Structure formats: structure tokens, C-alpha cells
Image (spheres, rainbow, N blue to C red):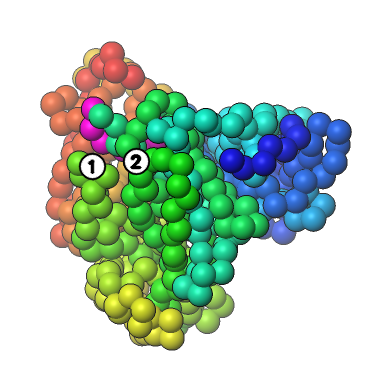
């Protein structure tokens, strides 16, 4: 079992960065209950939500979700370049502790928020536990690797997502070791392993007392440049998503390549370099809509990474991703009972091909407009508290292949919101 450690307290100091007033900075420290500063604790932005108004956008799908920080030797950590319109749910973990969640942290709000980490109780039932060790291709243990469960298999079948009773995250210790436990007996747990400098790996681990070795390797390097009329575009965001994302099946079977989207910003010369991209996968690369919509849109660029074991020195050069004129989609949301649209309501446009979306406000008059949309298939999701699209699971599917200003959406009262 992992060695128990003293109780700890997390102290967060949240401020808005003066250097970049449109973005937010969140800093904090981790200590034990005696005030001793604790290094090597992991803090993750787990979910987010809007401060004002209402949105049904997936709380773990915001761009800032998944960002991680590790406390330094003084117990301090910092998140920068956060969306100032969002609050954040933080997940805090350290070897020997039970993961703790801090809800609705507002980077602009005082006073300082605090949370306590409780010592992790030993798990003596091997049928509830997976034990692993993460190593590189030479067998060297990898500390501070993040291990996130994606699903659990029991006698009743396999279940995926955020599950009650399943520990939400583990971080490897200096020996590369970790444990994850479920509250009930299980046959296995599917995990995603993210080790610094290595490609993400998905693997199903059986429960039991034996510690399983997970070998991760570096992946491909992907290079490119984002340009607009031949001029470099700095400070934009590039996304990568597997062309066949697939999912998960029975008995923790991995179908396709269900990796999370990989994102990176462009440099001052418009260039970007994404390291450790998983091998043997066909990908889409694209400029993220919300970062370039005012300029236009990029087409999805298809490319592939090489075979496992041949990618350590491989560099995939995508060349220039050109921003071209994108489409405009505008319209009006109307409530069937004649009520006005409340302040702070939103509407989301999500791509079916790429992991890309835009969120815009709905005006009091119900009007909205999306800009810089690449041609393709999309889902439109209006978010108005107390109302929904009837018979469509709140989604409106459509193809965008031209400018359109006449999209009419009627929402009916709904008890589900």
C-alpha cells in the first residue's frame, strides 16, 4: 500500500493577472495541518462553469479543463491564462491522501478559499483495487504521472465516465507506483496514463494484489504554422483529435482512438510544435474556432503518426494551416410561452467532425450569431434555463455550407431544467 502521510490543507489565492487583463491567474499553496509546505502535490482544473447566466455546455469540456499544476519546493502552484468568465472546480491530490475537490473557485474572488486533504485509508480488499507502476521504455520509473480512471468493470458489466465510488485520479510516487480503488468489488479499471514527456496511454488493468507495469513511450512530434493571407497568426489555438475517436465497449474494450483533444497555442511567428502525439493514429488538425473566428476558419487537415517504436525521432510537418473566410450562422431563439430571454443565456455550436465549438450569448431579443465556421456538420444547443428543444434531446443537427441569418429556434417550457 502507499505510505500514509499527514493531513494537508490547500490554500488558494486567486487574482486577475494585471499583465493580461482579459485572462485570469490563480495561485495557491499546499500545506499540512502544521503549516509545513508540501511540494509535489498535483492540482488539476477538473470542471468549469459560467459565472453569470446559464449554460448546458459539458462542464469538463471547457478549454481550461485538464490543466495541471504541481507544487514546487515551497508548496506553491500557479495557473495562468484562464478564462475570467468561468469558475473552476479543482481536484487536489498527493501521494497518501484522498483526492479532494474544491468547488466553484472564482479567480477574481476574495477571501482566500481553503480545503483539507484527508489521509487515504488503506484498501485491504484486492477485488476493489488496481495497483500499477509506470515506467519509460528503458524501465525507468516515472514519478508524477497522472492516472485517470475512465471506466470500471464489475459482475454487472462495464460503466464509463465519472463514477460514484471510483477514485477520480491518482499520481505516481517517486517509484512510479500508484493505486486506484473502487467502493465495490470490480474485475478491472480502465485508466488513462499521462506522464510528462510521454504519449498518453489507455489501458485496462485487472483488479488484484499484483502490481502491473505500464510502459509508456514518447510519440510523434507534430509541427506546423497558422497563417492568414500568408501572415503568421500568433496567440491562436490549434487542436488535434483522432479521426476515428471510437469509444469504449463491454469488458473495458477500447474501440478506435478515444483520446482527449490535444491543444496548443501558436508562437509569435505562427508556429506550433506538439510533442508526444500518440502513434499509429489518424488525426485531424484545425484552428480552434473560438480563437480565430474573427479572422475566419481553417479546414480540417488530415495526417497520420507512425508506428509504435518508430516515432521517437519522427516529426510530422503539417506546413501552413491557412485561415480562410468562414461562414456566419445567425438567427433568433423564441420561447413558446412568449416570455423574454433572460440575461446570461447562451447557445453552443459544436462540430461533429472535430472536437471544436463556439459559445455565444443570446441577446434579450433572442438573437445570436456565430462567425468563422468551417463547412461541416454541427449540433446547435440552446441553453435557456427552464426551456428545451422538444423531441430533439436539446440538439439541433444541421450542415453549415453557406452564410445563414435566418435560423429560427423555438424552445418550450421544460421541467428538466
**Where residue 187 sits: x, y (%)?**
32, 37
- Quadrant in which the C terminus is drawn: top left
Towards the viewer: 58 or 11 = 11
Towards the viewer: 360 or 211 = 211
Which numbered tag is attached to residue 188? 2
Query: Residue at the spot x=53%, y=52% of the render?
Result: 146
Q: Can residue 285 be seen?
A: yes
Please identify the quarter of the rendering in which residue 159 is found. top left
If you read the primary sequence from the N terminus, does the residue marked by circle 2 or circle 1 appear first? 2
- Quadrant in which the N terminus is drawn: top right
Q: Which residues are magenta?
A: 156-163
Where disc 1 sits, the SS reads: helix
Q: Are marks 2 and 1 in contact (CB under 8 Å)?
A: yes
**Where residue 30 sits: x, y (%)?**
75, 42
Query: Residue at the spot x=25%, y=16% of the render?
Result: 413
Please identify the quarter of the rendering in which residue 193 is found. bottom left
**Where residue 407 sits: x, y (%)?**
19, 42
Residue on which the image places disc 1: 251
**Where residue 25 sits: x, y (%)?**
67, 50
Amino acid at each position: 500500500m502507499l505510505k500514509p502521510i499527514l493531513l494537508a490543507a490547500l490554500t488558494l489565492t486567486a487574482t486577475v493577472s494585471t499583465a493580461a487583463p482579459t485572462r485570469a491567474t490563480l495561485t495557491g499553496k499546499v500545506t499540512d495541518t502544521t503549516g509545513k509546505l508540501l511540494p509535489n502535490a498535483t492540482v488539476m482544473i477538473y470542471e468549469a462553469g459560467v459565472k453569470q447566466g446559464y449554460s448546458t455546455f459539458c462542464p469538463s469540456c471547457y478549454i481550461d479543463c485538464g490543466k495541471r499544476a504541481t507544487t514546487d519546493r515551497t508548496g506553491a502552484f500557479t495557473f495562468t491564462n484562464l478564462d475570467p468568465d468561468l469558475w473552476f472546480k479543482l481536484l487536489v491530490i498527493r501521494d497518501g491522501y484522498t483526492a479532494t475537490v474544491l468547488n466553484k473557485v472564482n479567480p477574481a474572488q476574495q477571501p482566500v478559499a481553503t480545503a483539507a486533504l484527508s489521509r487515504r485509508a488503506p484498501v485491504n480488499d484486492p477485488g476493489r483495487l488496481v495497483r500499477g507502476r509506470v515506467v519509460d521504455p528503458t524501465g525507468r520509473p516515472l514519478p508524477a504521472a497522472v492516472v485517470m480512471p475512465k471506466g470500471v468493470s464489475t459482475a454487472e458489466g462495464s460503466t464509463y465516465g465519472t463514477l460514484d465510488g471510483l477514485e477520480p485520479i491518482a499520481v505516481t510516487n517517486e517509484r512510479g507506483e500508484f493505486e486506484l480503488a473502487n467502493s465495490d468489488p470490480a474485475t478491472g479499471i480502465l485508466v488513462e496514463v499521462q506522464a510528462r514527456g510521454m504519449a498518453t496511454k489507455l489501458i485496462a488493468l485487472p483488479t488484484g494484489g499484483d502490481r502491473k507495469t505500464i510502459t509508456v513511450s514518447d510519440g510523434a512530434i507534430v509541427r506546423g504554422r497558422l497563417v492568414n493571407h500568408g501572415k503568421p497568426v500568433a496567440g491562436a489555438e490549434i487542436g488535434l483529435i483522432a479521426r476515428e475517436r471510437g469509444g469504449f465497449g463491454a469488458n473495458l474494450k477500447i474501440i478506435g482512438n478515444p483520446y482527449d483533444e490535444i491543444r496548443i497555442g501558436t508562437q509569435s511567428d505562427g508556429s506550433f510544435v506538439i510533442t508526444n502525439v500518440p502513434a499509429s493514429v489518424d488525426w485531424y488538425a484545425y484552428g480552434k474556432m473560438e480563437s480565430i473566428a474573427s479572422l475566419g476558419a481553417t479546414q480540417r487537415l488530415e495526417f497520420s503518426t507512425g508506428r509504435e517504436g518508430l516515432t521517437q525521432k519522427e516529426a510530422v510537418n503539417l506546413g501552413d494551416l491557412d485561415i480562410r473566410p468562414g461562414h456566419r450562422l445567425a438567427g433568433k431563439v423564441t420561447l413558446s410561452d412568449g416570455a423574454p430571454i433572460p440575461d446570461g443565456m447562451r447557445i453552443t455550436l459544436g462540430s461533429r467532425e472535430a472536437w471544436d465549438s463556439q459559445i455565444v450569448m443570446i441577446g434579450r431579443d433572442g438573437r445570436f450569431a456565430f462567425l468563422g465556421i468551417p463547412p461541416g456538420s454541427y449540433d446547435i444547443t440552446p441553453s435557456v434555463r427552464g426551456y428545451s428543444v422538444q423531441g430533439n434531446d436539446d440538439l439541433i443537427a444541421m450542415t453549415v455550407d453557406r452564410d445563414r441569418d435566418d435560423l429560427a429556434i423555438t424552445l418550450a417550457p421544460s421541467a428538466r431544467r
